[in-house]
Amino acid sequence: MGLNALETEMANFDFEGLSAQNESAKASIASAASVDDIKAAICGVWSKIGKYVKMAEVIPVVGKFITILADLLDSICAG
């Protein structure tokens, strides 16, 4: 994906929908009956933002922390 296509995709990203999903995920986590419920809530959000978060891995110093978090979320959401 080229930079222009990525910029267009990010400019058209549904942040309102993501915010709503995030609030729903937090509520689901707070009332979760199982680990699978928590995982589903977290991974639903991660599946929408993961590729954008991973772009920040190149930021000096902070990128190392982002890489660790992204790797953790990838491993949780992989299966």
Image (spheres, grey):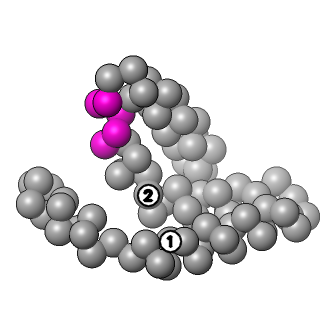
In the image, taking residue 38 as reference, residue 23 lies left or right, namely left
Question: Which quarter of the rendering shows the N terminus?
Answer: bottom left
Residue type pointed to by label 1: Leu
* 3D distance between C-alphas at marks 2 and 1: 9 Å
Q: Is residue 2 magenta?
A: no
Front residue of 60 and 25: 60
- Labels 2 & 1 near each other (Cβ < 8 A): yes
Which mark is drawn over residue 49? 2
Q: Secondary structure at mark 1?
A: helix
Considering only vertical position in the picture, is 47 above or below 70? below
**Residue at 34% across / 39% down in the picture?**
56
Magenta range = 55-59
Q: Residues within 10 Å of mark 2 (few under 14, many from 20)?
A: few
Q: Is residue 73 left or right of residue 2?
A: right
User: Is 30 displayed left or right of 51 in the figure?
Assistant: right
Where residue 74 appears, as percent x and y from the top left, is 52, 43
Q: Secondary structure at mark 2?
A: helix
Residue shown at the point (62%, 44%) measured from the top left: 76
Q: Is residue 52 visible?
A: yes
The amino acid type found where label 2 is placed reads Ile
What residue would you read off at disc 1? Answer: 18
